[in-house]
Amino acid sequence: MHATPSLDRPTEPTSVEVRWRRRTYPLPAEPSQTASDPPTNRIYQLREQPEEKALPDLLGEALWSLLPWSELPSDELDRQAVIEAYVGGLSQLERCQAEAKALIEACCEANLEFRQEVGETYLPARDKALKSQLSAMLSEAGDSWLPIRNILQAKLVSQPLPELRQRLHDALVTGVKEFSTEFFELLARLVDRELFGLVEWHPNHCCSYHFFKRVVIQENQGASQQVTTSYRNGRLAEVDSDEGDTVIGTRRTKTVRGKGQHTHRLARHEHGVMQAIRTSIGNSQVIMPPPVERLVNRVPAWLAPFVQVIDGQIFRERIIERDLKVAKWEDVEVRDEPILGWEPAVIIGPYVLTGWGPREVDQEQTRRRLLQESRRSEGAVQSATYRFPALIVAATLLTLIAVTLLIQSYRGQASVVFSLLATATAIGCVWQTVYDFAIQRRYPRPFLSAHWMTGSIGLQILLAQWLVARWFGPLSWLTPVVLGLGAIVCYVVGKQSESPVIE
């Protein structure tokens, strides 16, 4: 259930700063300019969970288990095997760096949003603007990691094996620790740069968290148009030497496919959630939009145990938007929305990688439903296309059989019951034939069209059988008139049912 959105414009400056681990997010651009900083009592102090302190060490243990060095026997005496295990460990850490960068890129894609405000969406301009915004986000998130240090040198390799092994072991331990520390420092820097958010857990399965969306708003102020301008030569007309035609001027055609502007904004989403739970990606049952699915699919195996999905019932959503090019926070739009719905998010410890809400869930459910209906419709069209020719032949043969049996019954060579059964079967086959034809042509009301057209054809079959009966004995001419008029009426109504429904 969704409540009507309300727009809240606070009378005093709104602070969005959060303090966690003696660090304030986001950090001010000019630390010396303290005059514009919010008062201390307006900075929200985020409480740290005990298990969050152990995350770097736990991640280091998970990384260490991936290294070939961890599987090296303690009594290994082959110098080459020791060197290869060390080099393999360095290669593994480099691969982990590349996977972490791919995950950050997927997070940026998931936190990119597009809106259309004026006119219709002009796709080339939209794609170009989104690509530009994504490049800017990746540039902000693209702090180059320190390269994994390789201490191998000829002087070190020449040392006795126990000393060599101890030096390499210490170097790998330091490398893993630096990697783990640097990874969480990167997450903290991304919170500073308003790409990621933070989560705080409260008693009784409640939590509050925030995340950011970079929003691209398109205003298409001009539709496609084509302007043709003709220019006349002021001098004597020239003659084209190839064709012999007279050149009397120039015609210039200018095509404008669309024009307008894009506004780039930063949206901060603050969610209050009750009945909140967090679970692993594999156990999560929440509906994820395609960008979030691509995000979780890029989570590497070594990081998967630390990535969780929050799910719960949202009771408040606060959205703060500002133009990215506006330096002052006075240009702020605050929307305070009391709503009820399911509100998931993807987190690593206290860091919120991305989130989505009831609107995105409804959109994804609608998209999946329409896709499923489209697939069912295409399957029905293909089946009808395959059955239609065979059903035409079957309906024709059954009609001929019914007429033949009727003739045989008048001659005393067959029972009229068989003719009635063949007639009923022929009409049923006609209905399926007409229904498949309506499905193949994508009529809006195939059942209605099949009913009326079958009625028309069935009355024509009965009219043909009346002619056969009239051959063998006198019958009233009122019957064929009624059958013919009924067939015409059914046909006309059936054609009307083929027209699109006007709402």
Image (tube, rainbow, N blue to C red):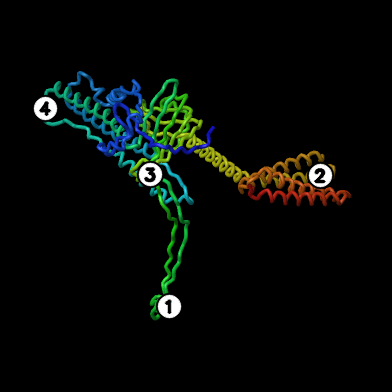
- First in residue order: circle 4 vs circle 1: 4
Q: Which mark is residue 158?
A: 4
Amino acid at dot 1:
Thr
Mark closest to the chain's N terminus, 2 or 3: 3
Q: Are marks 4 and 2 in contact (CB under 8 Å)?
A: no
* Callout in the foreground (1, 2): 1
Which kind of residue does numbered mark 4 sit on? Ser
State how far apart marks 4 and 2 are (Cα).
Answer: 110 Å
2 or 3: mark nearer the eye? 3
- Alpha carbons under labels 1 and 2: distance apart: 83 Å
Identify the residue position indicated by label 1 in the image.
246
Mark 4 touching mark 1, by CB under 8 A?
no
As shown in the figure, which amino acid type bears the numbered disc 3?
Asp
Of label 1 and label 2, which has the lower sequence position?
A: 1
Q: Which residue is mark 3?
A: 323
Q: How far is the residue under mark 4 from the one under mark 1?
A: 89 Å
Determine the residue positioned at 47% across, 31% down. Answer: 316
Q: Nearer the viewer, residue 189 or 87?
A: 189
Q: Position of residue 359 (x, y in %)?
A: 49, 37
User: Residue shown at 65%/50% (left/top)?
Assistant: 499
Mark 4 and mark 2 lie on one chain; the one further toward the N terminus is 4
